[in-house]
Image (cartoon, helix red, strand yellow):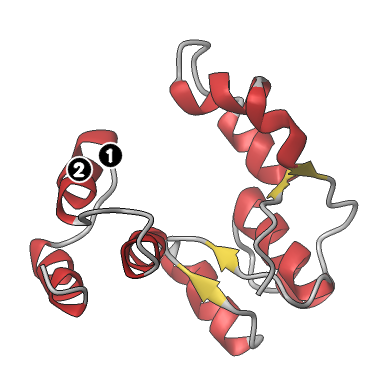
Amino acid sequence: MSNELIIPSGVVQEICIAPDNDPAKIWINNQGSIYIGDVDQIDISIAAWDLGLGESHVLSWVYKNPGYEAIIDDRAAKIAAVALEIPVRGTVGVILLAKQEGKLKAARPIFEQLPEVGFRVSTQVLESALKLVGE
């Protein structure tokens, strides 16, 4: 898998709808701008799934650029990715990988912050994930 971060333009469009004081919008308009990748067209096999713009751009990018992994949390987009054999990982998986690779000392504090930023995930899923990394 590529370690290069690409934020497809459709994701950027969705982020930039937020209020001007939104941390993600501020970041993407400043230091994050170097990671933006244009997606000229949504692949027809992905368009058929009728996903949101951001999810469609992410999946199209990875579909057309082997070696990348889609980072998405939308359930329908994950189902589409699996059906199209597109490598996919969600937020919880990214946190677990960072912990496994020693980039985080602990996953629990990050997991505890997720609901505070509007991320919906069950306590049972988080506890199961923490067991995978010995927490």
Check the image and report above or below for 85 versus 128.
Answer: below
Helix, strand or loop at label 1? It is loop
Q: Which mark is residue 129?
A: none
Between 83 and 127, the residue placed more toward the observer is 127
Q: What kind of residue is marked 2? A: Pro
- Residue drawn 16% across and 65% down? 126
Between 90 and 100, the residue placed more toward the observer is 100
Lateral position of residue 43 relative to residue 111, left or right: right
Check the image and report above or below for 18 versus 64.
Answer: above
Marks 2 and 1 in Cβ contact (< 8 Å) = yes
| Residue at numbered disc 1 | 118
Give neighbour class at mark 2: few <14, some 14-19, many 20+ (Cα, 10 Å). Answer: few
- Residue drawn 20% across and 35% down? 116
Q: What kind of residue is marked 1? A: Gly
- Residue drawn 17% across and 70% down? 125
To which quarter of the image does residue 51 belong? bottom right
Lateral position of residue 96 relative to residue 19, left or right: left
To which quarter of the image does residue 13 belong? top right
| Residue at numbered disc 2 | 115
Helix, strand or loop at label 2? It is helix
Q: Find the residue positioned furthest to the right.
A: 40
Lateral position of residue 126 relative to residue 4, left or right: left
Check the image and report above or below for 25 versus 104.
Answer: above
Where does the image place residue 70, in percent across and percent down from the top left? Answer: 60, 66
**Which quarter of the rendering shows the N terminus?**
bottom right
Where does the image place residue 74, in percent across and percent down from the top left? Answer: 45, 61
Q: Find the residue positioned furthest to the top.
A: 20
- Residue drawn 71% across and 51% down? 6
**Which quarter of the rendering shows the C terminus?**
bottom left
Lateral position of residue 53 relative to residue 118, left or right: right
To which quarter of the image does residue 61 belong? bottom right
Where does the image place residue 66, in percent across and percent down from the top left? Answer: 78, 77
